[in-house]
């Protein structure tokens, strides 16, 4: 899917939420900005923010910068790329997007929109570029049939240890965090498991309650995606 198909130069929405691989999404947005006549380097009216976890401090800074007038008569654009957003940060963004400023536009890029508050997502023009949903569901179907040792091996491959990073900024642009990967897989696993268990005359809802708790912990800074997903592997019934 081409992101440009959703962008109208003459009627640009004030805020876009784009779900998918930032390594592919960002170049398209940069090209679009250049087409608008907005330089993406050395230009105070273009701001590119890249962080792994977007926290309250980043949200407050963004709100402050977004309230400032542009240095030219052109548009002012903010491109924010983050694997996750804390609840405090989302609350600040929610208030900020309730009163959009003229000629100020935001592009938020994240690998999984399911990790965001529904009320926040509703403030955006939402674009999903994910093509891996079918693959996620297929892996989830295989996962629930695996023995516990094989599930652990699967998670080791899905959530590899962090590598040493010589160029932190470059790594952040191209790498999806383990927490984000875990969240996406957990969503698929829950969907597949729910469909299969619903056909059973009686089923235990305990695993779904556990999934809910794991999902909340995965969104917290510093949480161990590997440990949390291993607990999922242990509690998920073998079907």
Image (spheres, grey):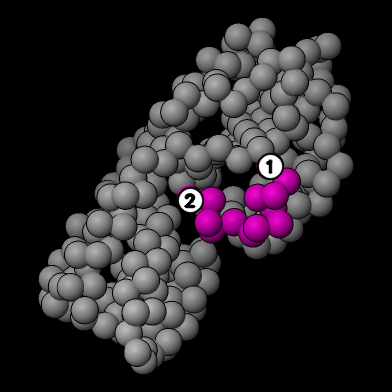
**Residue 32: assigned label:** none
Q: Are marks 1 and 2 in contact (CB under 8 Å)?
A: no
Q: Is residue 211 above or below residue 192?
A: below
Above or below for 39 versus 25: above
Q: Who is closer to the viewer here, 5 or 181?
A: 5
**Mark 2 surroundings within 10 Å by alpha-carbon count, few (fewer than 14), some (14 through 19), many (20 or more):** some
Instruction: Determine the image quadrant of residue 81.
Output: top right
* The quadrant where residue 207 appears: bottom left
Residue 210 x, y percent position in the rendering: 43, 82
Quarter of the picture holding the N terminus: top left
Residue 149 in the image, given as x and y percentages of width and height: 13, 76
- Residue 61 placement, left or right of 35: right
Q: How many marks?
A: 2
Task: Identify the magenta region.
Answer: 112-124
Tell me the quarter of the image containing the C terminus.
bottom left
Tag shown at residue 124: 1
Question: Residue 95 magenta-drawn?
Answer: no
Where does label 2 land, which residue? 112
Q: Locate residue 193 relative to residue 148 in the image: left or right.
A: right
Q: On the image, which quarter does residue 42 sit in?
A: top right
Is residue 182 in sight in this rendering? no
**SS class of the residue under badge 2?**
loop
């Amino acid at each position: 899917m081409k992101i440009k198909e959703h962008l109208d130069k003459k009627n640009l929405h004030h805020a876009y939420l784009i779900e998918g691989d930032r390594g592919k999404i960002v170049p398209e947005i940069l090209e679009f900005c250049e087409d608008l006549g907005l330089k993406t380097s050395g230009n105070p009216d273009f701001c590119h923010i890249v962080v792994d976890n977007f926290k309250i401090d980043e949200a407050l800074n963004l709100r402050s910068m977004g309230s400032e007038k542009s240095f030219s008569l052109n548009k002012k654009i903010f491109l924010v790329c983050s694997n996750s957003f804390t609840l405090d940060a989302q609350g600040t963004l929610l208030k900020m997007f309730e009163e959009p400023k003229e000629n100020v536009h935001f592009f938020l890029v994240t690998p999984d929109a399911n990790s965001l508050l529904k009320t926040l997502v509703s403030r955006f023009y939402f674009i999903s570029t994910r093509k891996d949903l079918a693959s996620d569901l297929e892996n989830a179907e295989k996962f629930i049939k695996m023995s516990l040792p094989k599930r652990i091996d699967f998670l080791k491959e899905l959530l590899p240890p962090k590598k040493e990073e010589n160029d932190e900024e470059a790594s952040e642009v191209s790498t999806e965090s383990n927490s984000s990967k875990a969240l996406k897989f957990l969503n698929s696993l829950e969907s597949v498991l729910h469909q299969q268990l619903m056909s059973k005359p009686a089923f235990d809802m305990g695993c779904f309650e556990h999934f809910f708790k794991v999902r909340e912990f995965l969104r917290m800074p510093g949480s161990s995606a590997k440990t949390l997903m291993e607990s999922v592997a242990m509690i998920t019934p073998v079907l």
